[in-house]
Amino acid sequence: MPPLLEVDDVYAGYGPIEVLKGISLTVDTGEIVALIGANGAGKTSTLLSISGCLPARRGSMRLAGQEIHALPAHEIVHRGICHSPEGRKIFPRLTVLENLQMGAFSRRDKPGIERDLAHAFELFPILAERKHQAGGTLSGGEQQMLAVARAMMGRPKLLLLDEPSLGLAPMIVLKIFEVVRKLNDEGISILLVEQAARMALKLAHRGYVMEMGQITIAGTAAELLTDKRVQDAYLGE
Amino acid sequence: MFPVLLAAAEAPDAWQTFLQYTLIGLSNGALFALVALGYTMVYGIIELINFAHGEVFMLGSFLALALIGVMGLEEAALWQRWLGIGLLFVVVPIFCGALNVGIDLAVYKPLRDAPKLAPLVSAIGVSFVLMNVGLLWGGAADRHFPDLVSRENLLGSEAALSFTYKDLMIVAVTVPIMIALSVFVKGTRLGKAMRATAQDPLAAKLMGINADRVISVTFAIGGALAGAAAVIYGLYINTVSYQMGFTNGLYAFTAAVLGGIGNIPGAVLGGLVIGLARAFGSGYVGERWTSALVFVILIAILVFRPAGLLGTHAREKV
């Protein structure tokens, strides 16, 4: 059986600037894979490229064996990849409920959507309280919860999470990571981009280290946590 | 231009005069608002000021004029007339909506990722092209548009205040359209997708929203509203010309900016403010000062509220 997601030697960039220089990685069904690295290494671009927002110039991407790298972004969502982007990108003047409904835009199964909505409110009770508030009025932590819940509403096979811990209090980060683990237990595979490398690797099954647009180290999470190079560069106490 | 009815000017009571100007202002303003909505909705989605919008409105009124001739509505019986007018309100908006979508697909879409100045200048170009199409179609002189709707005063021929069948037509067409638009944008899946795309295009894509489709729908709705406005304009003012798109487009665009460009209720409010300003201006100050007055109001509002009356945040300058 092919891996759920297979990224094979992908090059991408903005204008003359090449940001991804031959990225290859895989995510198997049921896995959490962490992608760690410094600012500007190309982690966010990798996720954008997978979800079709940054077209790959070379290389290929397959979801469950099917080519997806030439598809438009909205079609990739329909195939089962949902993306909680960097900076959360909540719709500021839509209510919390409308934001979540937008997350389910690619679906038509009303009862399923209702069930997932109830599930999202169960995972993040604060969102239920703020249901009719505009997204832009939420605190940073609440917005991040909304971003994760919104991506989950698409009922993805693969969830792309970009820096869910960025700028948040440790308590809230723990809460969000706990939900990520729950979602994974429910069968959603996850590709997690994080600067908080230690936390990400403790959560993940496997990990990749990115530097200057390339994958430099790959291994199981346990291997990376004990790897000298990773420890020195990303896990420094 | 909207010549203001001065029928009530002789009314002895100052309050009645004021009320009359208000009525005229509101009905003209509703018309501006319909056109302004097309500017504001397109700007909200792709941050383009569609300068060709006024010309779509103009061509719509030319089509309405041609259809009236073909159907022979001037000589028709009353019920046939109403049926024909009803048909105009269906056919012309469809034509204008399709024309607007066509302009987007042919001209703006290839420039979607280009610097913003490129589609903007192209829009001005399209506007000139369409204006010349209008010139070829209708000629350079003002054209008479048949007076199909009665000027009879609904309040009785003796009443000091005048509210005619024409005024009623404006209310009867614009109010339901605006209610339908607001229900569509607030309540439907596609309407929400439209608002989402306007607020954050990248996030909207990540939700699985097909941005191209949302943009086409926006152009279609904006064009259709201009088409409805074109029919009303012809029936109300009874004169159309190839230049009417430019002048009225300018007022409608001003209305959109006044209300806060990109903001739908803002466009309606801006339209009403401009309609009232023009009515009071020509009533109390003098017809020739109305344009100056409208733009003085615009400048004043932009100085004190740069984002417009209902605009939430200052947009990028173009």
Image (cartoon, rainbow, N blue to C red):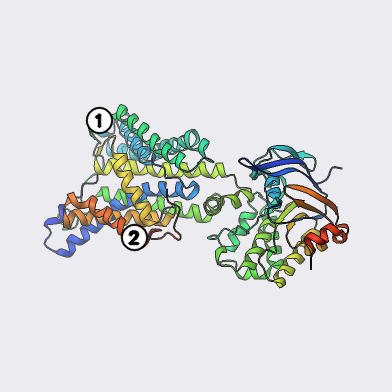
Which residue is tagged 2?
B303
Of the two numbered discs 2 and 1 in the rendering, the one whose residue sits closer to the viewer: 2
Q: Is residue A113 left or right of residue B120?
A: right
The image quarter in which residue B150 lies:
top left
Quadrant for the C terminus of chain A, please: bottom right
Q: Are marks 2 and 1 in contact (CB under 8 Å)?
A: no
Determine the secondary structure under disc 1. Answer: loop
Of label 2 and label 1, which has the lower sequence position? 1
Above/below status of B117 relative to A86 = above
Instruction: Locate residue A182, reporting x and y percent.
Output: 78, 63
- The three-letter code of the residue at mark 1 reads Ala
Q: Residue at 52% x, 51% y: name it.
A: B198
Tell me where residue B23 appears, x and y as whole percent: 25, 56
Where is residue A137 shown, x and y percent of the image?
55, 67
In the foreground, A143 or A33: A33
Residue in front for this viewpoint, B234 or B308:
B308
Q: Which residue is under mark 1? A: B140
Please name the amino acid that badge 2 sits on: Val
**The disc label shown at residue A47, or none:** none
Question: Dot 2, crowdedness within 10 Å: few (<14), some or many (≥20)?
Answer: few
Q: In the image, residue B80 lies at what x, y percent?
A: 31, 36
Q: Which chain does the numbered disc 2 sit on? A: B
